[in-house]
């Protein structure tokens, strides 16, 4: 139960960041005063005033300083102190996130509280000052939000936004600077100066955080075109010299891939529908009482999206999580001036901040997130896309699940859905595909204990694990799927949590092909990178995950490659001969046609089951049209194969905001409520 105003002891609560620091003193006491127990007394001392050692004088608390400065009133401070006690948060964060004080007033108050100076404007364009600041390693500067600021005489002035950790900071900087004095700066001032001093080094480090043997950054772009040309020429030669045999082998391979893919989907359906057992994660995890809510950082990568500030703020403002513990980082490339200018002109809430990413190569989303991870403040790190509209209770759901989950659970993946599913036929098919992926396949393979290829958004990690595995591979265009493999190789588990984020469905064939080609290219490179050393992969994953990894990644690529071959047998219906007949017994063509029809029916039934949610059932009549939708993946594969050879690290970005939003599909809160309903059968 929250404490009432009458029950609050304001003397105890008025501390800001740390227990009251004090300075020892010898104070005069009148002779009639009772000395503290155990205090030394001189029996020969004459009557009159005597001096005794007493408890030291405490330093003023931050709340008292702010009241004395007149920048806050008692009612607002009282409310902030209650929130501080409830959340176990820093008082400064409460005051700033609630808009009760400005960052400048808070910095002046912290300086006054501790008898320190207020940092002046950071030096600009001074190579000598920059070199001095770089003497302090970036990991120390980031940990303490502190940097050498300037020199006065023989003293180095070190600015910090965390003066409550002054003793720790003094010990940390001692090996690098002899004589120091400390001043107080704001968070924004320190972070801006950090970007100037250490930005380039942090950006270079962001490009190669992942161990080399698990990264595709050493992909040989010079030899790739030659290899691609050789494989292409061999395929053309085989088809031209032995066309019938090549087609027969391709049909056999296509049937095999189709059967194994359907088997995996069927196993996922069984795993989802059966009660949790044998160590499988619960589909609907129980809610738990939290002892203490953690700080959660959300990284939102933006690129060429100048109009996103207002809708993004509105959507994330619906999150039901204390603003004092919510750290939203808008991650933008430093060269993306249109987006940065738009954000600079927008009025962002205090719990949002912009992190410009210094230029570098490759200019990809994972590289930007690696850089921003240095500035994250939360113990849990999440990812949203620019157009995402998460469920209001999503952060609380994630936090509670991390609290209840085993320590080996490093990642929680939410479900994705769309707020424009009826835009057109493409949007309907895209929604059906995602419904099956996020509500059937991913939960199923997670419960079976297989490798989970993560989605690019609504992802949440234990920060300590994310940093331990090296963050994201900056050179992989499906960094999410690759990270899922690396987590599995490290022995970490991923769970799919039933909380939904709405985003925009891809509703254009050409845009769909571009997006899918990036995914296929990333899957190809992820499979190739992790298959470099099969023996090591086997040891890391174990037999079940090893075979599951190859089945999942290879079938995703081979299905797109062999789909035209699979359907080539349809000519038999019209009495046209097919080379596969030579390998079939009498009447085998009829049997093959029946088998393929049966496989198609099973696929549609599984897709039907994947659309069990109430808000997906109206899409079920469109399931048969997926036979026209999926062949587009073959075009995407051709584009992906060419890019693997010519430009493997090219990021083909999907444009957002072009296919209609919630205005055409009803209120977003109504959609989210419908998606939270239990699925039917």
Image (cartoon, rainbow, N blue to C red):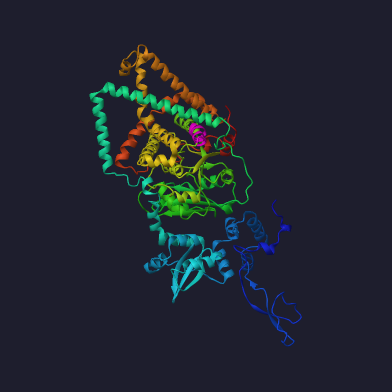
The spot of residue 460 in percent (x, y) is 51, 45
Q: Is residue 251 above or below residue 329?
A: above
The spot of residue 284 in percent (x, y) is 58, 37
The spot of residue 598 in percent (x, y) is 45, 19
Magenta residues, start to end? 436-448
Task: Give the side of residue 619 with respect to residue 549, left or right.
Answer: right
For the point 49% across and 62% down, the residue is 145
The spot of residue 671 in percent (x, y) is 56, 36
Task: Give the side of residue 87 with respect to residue 300, left or right.
Answer: right
Task: Name which quarter of the figure residue 541 lies in.
Answer: top left
Task: Name which quarter of the figure residue 278 lies in.
Answer: top right
What kind of secondary structure does the magenta stretch mostly adopt? helix
439 falls in the magenta region: yes
309 falls in the magenta region: no
Q: Is residue 591 above or below residue 212?
A: above
Q: Residue extending furthest top? A: 586
Front position in the image: 106 or 197? 197
């Amino acid at each position: 139960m929250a404490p009432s105003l009458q029950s609050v002891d304001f003397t105890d609560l008025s501390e800001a960041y740390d227990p009251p620091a004090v300075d020892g003193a010898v104070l005069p006491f009148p002779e009639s005063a009772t000395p503290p127990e155990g205090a030394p007394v001189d029996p020969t001392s004459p009557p009159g005033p005597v001096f005794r050692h007493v408890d030291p004088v405490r330093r003023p608390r931050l709340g008292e300083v702010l009241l004395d400065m007149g920048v806050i009133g008692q009612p607002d401070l009282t409310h902030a102190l209650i929130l501080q006690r409830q959340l176990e948060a820093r008082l400064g964060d409460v005051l700033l996130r609630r808009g009760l004080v400005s960052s400048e007033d808070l910095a002046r108050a912290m300086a006054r509280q501790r008898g320190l100076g207020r940092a002046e404007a950071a030096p600009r364009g001074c190579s000598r000052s920059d070199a001095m600041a770089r003497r302090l390693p970036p990991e120390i500067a980031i940990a303490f939000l502190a940097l050498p600021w300037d020199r006065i005489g023989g003293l180095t002035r070190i600015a910090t936004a965390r003066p409550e950790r002054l003793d720790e900071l003094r010990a940390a900087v001692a090996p690098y600077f002899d004589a120091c004095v400390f001043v107080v700066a704001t968070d924004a001032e320190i972070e801006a100066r950090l970007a100037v001093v250490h930005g380039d080094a942090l950006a270079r480090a962001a490009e190669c955080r992942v161990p080399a043997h698990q990264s595709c950054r050493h992909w040989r772009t010079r030899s790739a075109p030659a290899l691609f040309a050789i494989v292409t020429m061999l395929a053309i030669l085989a088809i031209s010299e032995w066309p019938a045999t090549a087609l027969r082998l391709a049909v056999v391979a296509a049937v095999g891939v189709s059967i194994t893919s359907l088997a995996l989907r069927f196993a996922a359906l069984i795993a989802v529908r059966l009660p949790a057992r044998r160590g499988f994660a619960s589909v609907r995890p129980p809610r738990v009482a939290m002892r203490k809510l953690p700080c959660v950082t959300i990284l939102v990568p933006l690129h060429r999206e100048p109009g996103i500030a207002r809708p993004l703020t509105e959507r994330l403002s619906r999150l039901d999580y204390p603003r004092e513990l919510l750290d939203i980082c808008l991650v933008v490339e430093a060269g993306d001036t249109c987006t940065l200018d738009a954000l600079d002109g927008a009025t962002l809430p205090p719990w949002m901040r912009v992190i410009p990413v210094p230029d570098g190569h490759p200019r990809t989303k994972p590289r930007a997130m690696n850089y921003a991870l240095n500035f994250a403040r939360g113990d849990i790190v999440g990812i949203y896309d620019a157009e995402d509209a998460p469920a209001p209770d999503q952060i609380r759901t994630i936090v509670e699940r991390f609290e209840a989950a085993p320590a080996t659970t490093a990642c929680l993946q939410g479900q994705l859905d769309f707020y424009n599913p009826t835009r057109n036929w493409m949007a309907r098919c895209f929604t059906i595909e995602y419904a099956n992926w996020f509500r059937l396949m991913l939960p199923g393979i997670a419960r079976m204990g297989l490798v989970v290829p993560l989605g690019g958004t609504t992802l949440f990690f234990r920060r300590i694990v994310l940093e331990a595995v090296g963050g994201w591979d900056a050179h992989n265009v499906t960094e999410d799927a690759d990270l899922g493999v690396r987590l599995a190789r490290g022995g970490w588990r991923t769970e799919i949590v039933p909380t939904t984020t709405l985003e925009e469905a891809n509703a254009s064939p050409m845009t769909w092909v571009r997006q899918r080609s990036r995914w296929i290219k990333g899957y190809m490179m992820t499979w190739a990178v992790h298959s470099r050393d099969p023996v090591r992969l086997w040891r890391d994953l174990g037999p079940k995950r090893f075979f599951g990894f190859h089945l999942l990644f290879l079938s995703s690529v081979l299905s797109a490659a062999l789909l035209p071959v699979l359907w080539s047998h349809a000519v038999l219906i019209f009495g046209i001969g097919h080379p596969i007949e030579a390998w079939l017994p009498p009447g085998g063509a009829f049997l093959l046609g029946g088998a393929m029809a049966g496989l198609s029916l099973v696929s549609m039934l599984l897709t039907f089951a994947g659309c069990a949610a109430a808000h997906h059932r109206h899409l079920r009549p469109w399931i048969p049209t997926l036979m026209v939708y999926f062949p587009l993946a073959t075009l995407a594969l051709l584009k992906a194969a060419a890019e693997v050879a010519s430009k493997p690290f090219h990021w083909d970005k999907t444009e957002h905001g072009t296919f209609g939003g919630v205005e055409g599909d009803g209120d977003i809160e109504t959609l989210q409520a419908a998606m939270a309903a239990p699925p039917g059968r």
